[in-house]
Image (spheres, rainbow, N blue to C red):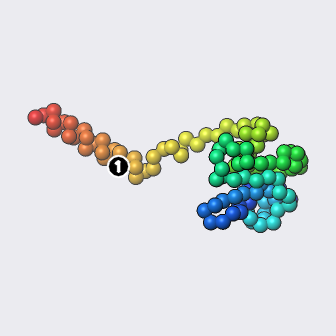
């Protein structure tokens, strides 16, 4: 059984609240889980101690059993010092799309034409 430590969403519409749970990876996001390990409330301030609460003993137990934390949960664990920090790099995310590149080239060409016309006069 492939175990995950992940978030299960609760709360009402536009008021998210998450439980950190240990669950079988084949179960739905908000479905059946094996154990509740903590909570995460993204509406609270980032420096609030109530924002992320974890039962570290149980989290460590599940990690020892081979459970894989999701990306968001692994960030919580990195902040708590339980898991070593991973190097993350996504250079393509900051890069402009094809259409934006085409618009920028077109704008640069128009500006170059305008500067040449002004230089000739």
115 displayed left or right of 8: left
Q: Indicate the quadrant containing the C terminus: top left, top right, bottom left or bottom right.
A: top left
SS at circle 1: helix
Q: Tell me where residue 120 appears, x and y as whole percent.
A: 12, 34
Reply above or below: 48 against 43.
above
- Residue 117 visible within the image: yes
Residue in the foreground of this view, choosing between 70 and 53? 53
Residue at 76% x, 43% y is 77
**Residue 2 appears in the rendering:** no
Task: Give the labeled residue for mark 1.
Answer: 103
Foreground residue among 88 and 35: 35
* Relative horizontal placement of residue 15, taking residue 35 as reference (left or right): left
Vertical arrangement, residue 48 with respect to residue 36, above or below: above
The quarter of the picture where residue 20 lies is: bottom right
Q: Does 109 sit left or right of 98 as displayed?
A: left
Q: Quadrant of the N terminus?
A: bottom right
């Amino acid at each position: 059984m492939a175990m995950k430590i992940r978030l299960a969403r609760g709360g009402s519409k536009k008021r998210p609240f998450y439980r950190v749970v240990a669950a079988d990876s084949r179960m739905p996001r908000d479905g059946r889980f094996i154990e509740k390990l903590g909570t995460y409330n993204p509406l609270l301030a980032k420096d609030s101690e109530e924002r992320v609460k974890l039962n570290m003993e149980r989290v460590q137990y599940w990690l020892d059993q081979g459970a894989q934390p999701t990306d968001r949960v692994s960030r919580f664990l990195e902040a708590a010092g339980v898991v070593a920090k991973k190097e993350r790099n996504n250079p393509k995310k900051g890069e402009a799309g094809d259409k934006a590149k085409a618009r920028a080239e077109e704008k640069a060409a128009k500006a170059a034409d305008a500067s040449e016309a002004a230089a000739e006069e």
